[in-house]
């Protein structure tokens, strides 16, 4: 694709504005988590991308038809207010993914309506917030999403996400993480849904400055490039087709059958 | 499993009672399609199964909590009134599949709410009703679902279902069908969702007596046996777990990292 | 399958007899590693199985045509003398797996000729022998191989096997292990090859008494039951078929194509 | 990748020179089948590729270390003389694929040593040479290999290849073909092996001029672009790693375990 990938970085933007978290968030993510993610993509991909942000508190959650129709890859971070996302918007995002738009579901977006709808499972997991060290190991070293990252990526402090992670068997297993407490998590997984590509990546949390980590920024940039549709101008959701005449004209079976 | 598999054969029971189709259905399926499917299972599996039927026109679509809680494998056939199935019942079936109940989605159930919810795709396809001959080829000959069926199964007359069939890449591809018009369809596919097993099988239609075909009966019987949970008494939907203390006590990194 | 599963437990039987390891092995595995594995299967599966052992130092490595033809599931443990296994025997095992025999490749058998031949990859990995604690986490809780084992299995001391493990993407991911040093390993994986089922399971080492661990014995017993062919009497390797006459008699395309 | 993809088109070059086939081949493929394939790639991909050919009758089958080390994607067509390909060359190609080189295995290359070695199965199939019409249906419409081809591709006359095709479950199923005789074949499949990508595509035969078909040329061009390594300069076969010190320093279990 020679024209830039049009990326919309979607953020819940709740912790940034909640009484409990405002102060810490301002320190860790002065431009919001969506702002940090967007800045990382622009820093690493330059004019390969056109990046904008959208947040849940905007009209239509910032995902108007016009925005969606000009989005090649959508990244999604949500946590505290999944339940308040409008089902109508979720369905529009879903249709667009099936049509070919790429989706990056990040960290606590495992429980977002859009991710659950695309997976068809509970997407539940085990968790513990005790500042574990996370090691992110590459299990698919030839994959473009794993390009240019160390083996393992070391994240000094992070929320623990552990198995059993109730997801469909991934089409590709890119990363698996371990935690200093001993747990394991399939932290980087891909699936196709319709014509669209989905990448789930778990590192990243509101309480830790993970989205400033250079290796995590690299993975997200790789993920955006991977998830971009091959034919950005032709995103159409699959639909039922009434196929009129047979292609072969003969339909008899041979005698001895 | 030594105790019998408890099977509930669910039918839409619409064509059987509609003005347009009643007469033909009475000829092809005097006990309803659900009745024919249930009879085939009992005929082939005997005391390996306990079979009952449930239909959409019953209270709670025949799928009360008591029925679901005593169902190991559910077979689902619907077509004309998918939209009228209560979302609350669909969600109960969904939770039970994730907990371990097997599901056989049959023919036009590709567009049922429960199948779409488990797949996360549009499940759309190409179709034509012109009495094509269908050949059902085995592409996984060691699989128990393919046991005892010819290669190919020949169905003299059947509705054509063709690609593109918008489903996630199957975990296992058991059958692929061709049609006398030249089309192709992934007609027998499996997926795991949570702890449950899902088998989609396309042969079977209200306008053709396909559920009386001995090879199709065999595939359904095999499918029920395959989809039965390994631990029928322990069907519990996966849920989020707050995991308290770390298992490993040390969490320091070695110095040179 | 109502008749017992015929299991052949194959062992390299090298460490048991080498000057360096003889003493320690006699303590950990007085009947050899193959003896311990065989005893565990008999203990847990009783008359569901008929278990015998075969070792590399026997004529034809103990795998005569007669033995192979009466084996439903073969378990394979080798380490120091992979290179001395006769290619002709490897090919016979390979043909039998493609025909439907189950294979359990255990621990260092990742580098056995038979496993590499079935995988088509280097099967290389990362390792360190420093008495790490291994935690074996279940990532497919509905799978019969995971039945009845804790989450995680705790192995106090074990050799570390880590990623990148160069294997094809598993058809099913049953277990993933972490180690006290922080590493991760896809320790329980399945694949179909031809009509046969292959289960790789990494816990188990000559220097640690892992095959006496009750949970590891349980996994091996589950694995044997899972890998057993559905049709034990019909093990035939797939071969090329010259298919004489067309099934459909008409082959013209419709005019407008 | 901004520098051109370095493609080596490998041909058996036997039918071109055999007494039986020389005349017909000269008509259908005046520059050999490898020449036709190479010309198609250059025609469609222009300066995105650097294409050369190599044939079995050359020293080292044309695949010297120098050639392999400067090949990003290798296409392989063989049929009558698979058995005469030197195992040492096959092993070099195998190591290079595991290191990241892309491989396109074409038509009768299903029985080539390199394809069987990468698959770990018999790769046997059903066949009949009776000038069937083949329809190539897309089952993964978002995939780059399917870009720009009709649904279905129509090949007027072609050898029939049918199921059961004894291959591992494909990582991706791109195309499935039907034949006018009623058979079906998984004609376009992908797998990862190590860091390399493998694409098998069945249309193409010495007796039919299929490699001049514009849609087949398009698929091959798409396949070459897809199979190109993401990091062409870094092709290294995975190998065993002795990983010295643990990353985490603590290894005790918590008391209550």
Image: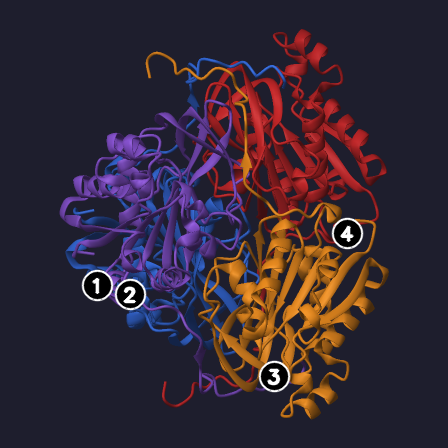
Chain colours: A purple, B orange, C red, D blue
Q: Say if mark 1 contacts mark 2, CB within 8 Å.
A: yes
Image position, residue D198 (x, y; %) = 39, 50
Image position, residue C39 (x, y; %) = 78, 26
Image position, residue A29 (x, y; %) = 25, 35
Q: Quadrant of residue D29?
A: bottom left
- The residue that disc 2 covers is D218
Label 3: which secondary element: loop
Callout 4: few (<14), some (14-19), or many (20+) C-alpha neighbours within 10 Å? few
Residue situated furthest front in the rendering: A19
Label 2: which secondary element: helix
- The residue that disc 4 covers is C233
Q: Nearer the viewer, residue C180 or C29?
A: C180
Callout 3: few (<14), some (14-19), or many (20+) C-alpha neighbours within 10 Å? some
User: Counting residues from the N terminus, which is met first, the one under dot 1 or under dot 2?
Assistant: 1
Give the residue displayed 48% in from the left and 57% down from the top.
B169
Question: Relative to B235, is B218 above or below?
Answer: below
Question: Label for residue D44?
Answer: 1
For disc 1, the chain is: D
- The residue that disc 3 covers is A253
Image position, residue B178 (x, y; %) = 54, 74
């Amino acid at each position: 694709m020679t024209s830039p990938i049009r990326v919309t970085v979607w953020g819940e933007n709740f912790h940034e504005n909640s009484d409990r978290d405002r102060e810490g968030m301002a320190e860790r993510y002065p431009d919001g988590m969506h702002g940090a993610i967007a800045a990382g993509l622009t820093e690493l991909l330059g004019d390969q991308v056109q990046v904008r942000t959208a947040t849940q508190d905007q009209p239509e959650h910032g995902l108007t038809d016009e925005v969606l129709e000009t989005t090649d890859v959508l990244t999604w971070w949500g946590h505290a207010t999944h339940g308040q996302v409008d089902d109508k918007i979720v369905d529009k995002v879903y249709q667009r993914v099936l049509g070919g738009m790429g989706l990056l579901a990040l960290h606590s977006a495992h429980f977002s309506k859009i991710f659950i709808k695309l997976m068809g499972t509970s997407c539940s997991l085990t968790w513990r917030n005790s500042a574990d060290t996370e090691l992110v190991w590459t299990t698919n070293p030839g994959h473009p999403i794993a390009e240019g990252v160390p083996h393992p990526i070391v994240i000094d402090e992070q929320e623990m996400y552990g198995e059993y992670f109730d997801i469909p068997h991934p089409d590709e297993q890119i990363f698996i993480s371990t935690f200093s407490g001993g747990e394991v998590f399939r932290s980087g997984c891909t699936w196709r849904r319709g014509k669209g590509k989905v990448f789930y990546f778990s590192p990243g949390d509101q309480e830790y400055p993970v989205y400033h980590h250079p290796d995590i920024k690299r993975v997200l940039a790789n993920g955006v490039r991977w998830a971009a549709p091959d034919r950005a101008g032709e995103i159409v959701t699959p639909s039922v087709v009434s196929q009129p005449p047979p292609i072969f004209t003969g339909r008899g079976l041979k005698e001895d059958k």
